[in-house]
Image (cartoon, rainbow, N blue to C red):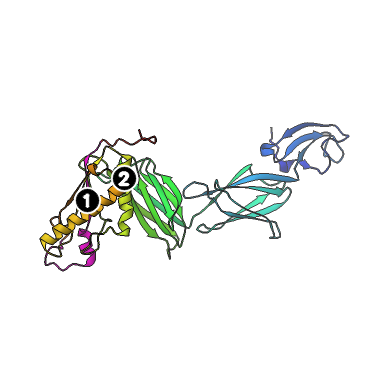
Amino acid sequence: MTKLTPSDILTFDSDINSKADDFGYIPGPEERFAYFSSNRNGGQGGDDIYVVLPEEYTFNLLVISSFTDRPVANVKVEIKNERGNVVAESTTDEAGRTPLKLEMNKRYELLATKSGYFDKTKDINMTAEGEFVNKEEVLYIDPSHRLQGQVVNIFGDEPIEGSTITIAQDGKPVDSATTDADGYFKADIQPEHNYLVTAAADNFFGTDIEFSTAGMEPGELFYYFQLYPLDAGTRIGLNNIYFDYDKHDIRPDAVRVLDRMVETLAKYPDINIKLEAHTDSRGTDEYNQRLSERRAKATLDYLVRKGIDKSRIEAVGLGETQLVNECADGVDCSEEKHQENRRTVFEIKKSKVTQKTSSGE
């Protein structure tokens, strides 16, 4: 038995319910057309099969990133007729969808555009000979700039599944992702913007990276996030908590890291920590010891002001006794190398990694 398609069947422009013997009305897939039989005049035999085409057809367009397989919002969609004139325009919503209504028996070209994505076109044939479109038609577009990364345990580099990735663009959160079983995630990013990407996971201390796509050619960036487990004995070296030379004030670039420690201690009330402040080698041993103690106190005071119980924190200054590089007394080093030694280390002294519930119980 040969399967009939709309191109094999007669179309018509008159009423379905005519004076002839019209029977066997059968809707086609996706309500794009219908079949019926009739012995009306103008056919090719006794009873012929006809196809009914609606005057208009409404469907949803779903736009998806070919990189992340996730919907893409704010995509501009233009529909052009065979003469190249724009007959319809719309924009995808947060779910990547937009409704479209087109006249039947015509051919169109769809154009999807958005900054940070390559333009994508699609031919739409609404004639009886065409493949039509589905009630929800999917269109994949290719991002010009892509971000991929992996989140692992810093001890052993084991992947961390289910990590939460938060992406801020020019200071505003714009996207999020979750790592798979191998600790990987993907995200579309835009050209000519500054980004802060944060990785967080239950029972781990989160971290972040900053980068800019200004001047970046189309391509992909990859970042490797190593998280410290919140286990007793873990030493978390927070090199982002730097101090200016000969000062103990909390610098603005250290606030983000300290706020993450505040969030961690608030989330895990069973954790107690030891806070160590270190200096570079410039200055006398005695002066650096006192300076490190002031830095330790400044860091402690910041955490306490943010609501952390002082009894959970032991703060000590270790001066220049534990340098992390070769920049000891008398060694000529750059300012960047000296700054590596002006750091803060948190050691977890007690931990059950018991999370605080949302109700506070």
Q: Is residue 244 above or below residue 163?
A: below
Q: Amino acid at mark 2?
A: Gly
Residue at the spot of label 2: 307
Comparing 39 with 76, the one in front is 76
Residue pointed to by mark 1: 345
Q: Secondary structure at mark 1?
A: strand
Looking at marks 1 and 2 on the same chain, the residue that comes earlier in the sequence is marked by: 2
Q: Element under label 2? A: loop
Image quadrant in which the N terminus is located: top right
Q: Using the image as rendered, state which of residue 272 and residue 110 is in the foreground.
A: 272
Label 1 crowd bin: few (<14), some (14–19), many (20+), radius 10 Å: some
**Image coords of residue 175 (percent x, y):** 46, 50
Is 41 within the magenta? no
Residue at horizontal 11 percent and vertical 67 percent from the top: 330
Residue 235 against residue 85 in the figure, above or below:
above
Vertical placement of residue 51 versus 339, above or below: above
252 or 16, which is in the foreground? 252
Quick check: can you spot residue 324? no
Magenta-tinted stretch? 326-351
Which quadrant of the structure image shows residue 113? bottom right
Q: In the figure, is residue 225 to the left or right of 8?
A: left
Left or right, 195 with respect to 50, comes to: left
Which one is nearer the viewer's eye here, 68 or 334? 334
User: How far from the left and from the top, in percent, is residue 230?
Assistant: 27, 41
Q: Are marks 1 and 2 in contact (CB under 8 Å)?
A: no
Question: In the rendering, at what x and y percent does residue 44 appear?
Answer: 82, 39
Magenta includes 335? yes
